[in-house]
Amino acid sequence: MVTKDYVLSLVERAERGDRRALGRLLTILEDVSSETAWVLEYLAGRSRGAHVIGVTGIPGSGKSSLISRMIRVLRDKGYRVAVITIDPTSPLSSGAILGDRLRMQEHATDPGVFIRSVTTAGALGGLSLSALAMIEAFDALGYDKVIVETVGVGQSETHVMHATDTIVVVTMPGAGDDVQALKAGVLEIGDIYVVNKSDKPEASKTYEYMLFVAEKGEIGRSGAWKPVVVKTSSTLGMGIRELVEAVEKHLEHLRNSGEKLSRLSSRRRLLVKLLAEKIVLDLLDKVAEEELAKTQEGLEGFYKRAIEIARTTGEKLLNLKIQ
């Protein structure tokens, strides 16, 4: 059983730089339940205003390598950096190949960097409850930048829009149809667009195209912020500082416009929604197992208890002050 004293001890030790304690805290958050939901409330109450950066885009565009380069620049600026890499979940084993973390191993010994891989856990929006819970943990522990790398571009990548402050969308030269898919999939969510691998042929053509659609307003979120397009090369380290500067300017815009607070509220609303779904589904699984084990005609009892669960869970969640 996860006790309050145990969690407080983990948080205290993690604040002192105990990486093992931080790892154990994150493990608790990997499977949040109705019994451990209070941990989220506690962490949310300790928020320090971390800048949450979402990195998404075309699979194969070099997102992990790009993030690794970004970490170097952010660390040079004195920031503490946490990275949450989202890996696809196998529909058969429910496991995941946690490979993105391997590409960032150069930062493994840096006490100012912590990298954690989590699965989508079947979440249709690309981010799981555990990923959102970990954002709260890193925020509460004083990490300045929390980078969330999602699986890839697509219509289902909607949660990253509500869970992060700044969204970086990555593409690459010669992507062709993939860029069209990018326009269709994340048309309105990007704040900064990156043409990575720009040392390769066709980079200028892709960059000019991205500038063109940005100028026309065909990409990027609506609002006062005008999407920025940056050319980078993770291999050569080109354009990384320019990318980080664009990210910093977007944060300044969010603070000056008041949007930083609204995006925090958006993340918390998504967190509570996913928490509610998790609690209800866990209860329904338990009820279904109990009722259907009694008799093959146990559906009537299951339905009655399912409705009761649906009605009462919302009231319980109102007691959580995640705002």
Image: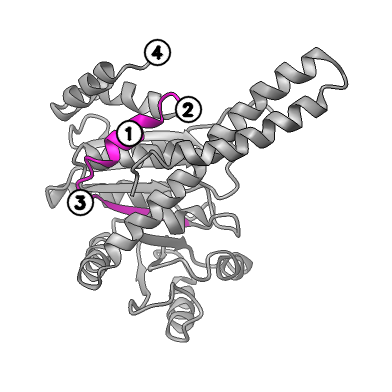
Given residues 148 and 289, the one toward you in this image is 289
First reached walking from the N terminus: tag 2 or tag 1: 2
Circle 1: is it few (<14), some (14-19), or many (20+) Cα within 10 Å?
few
Circle 2: is it few (<14), some (14-19), or many (20+) Cα within 10 Å?
some
- Give the side of residue 42 with respect to residue 164, left or right: left
Mark 3: secondary structure: helix
Given residues 62 and 236, the one toward you in this image is 62
Front: mark 2 or 1: 2
The residue pinned by badge 2 equals 33
Q: Position of residue 304 (x, y in %)?
A: 73, 31
First reached walking from the N terminus: tag 3 or tag 1: 3
Residue 1's disc is 4
The residue pinned by badge 1 equals 105
The residue pinned by badge 3 equals 74
Q: Say which residue appears at 37% left-offset and 39% top-offset.
A: 320
Task: Give, as a single range, the part of the protein colored magenta.
Answer: 35-56
Front: mark 3 or 1: 3
**At label 1, which amino acid type do we have?**
Gln
First reached walking from the N terminus: tag 3 or tag 2: 2
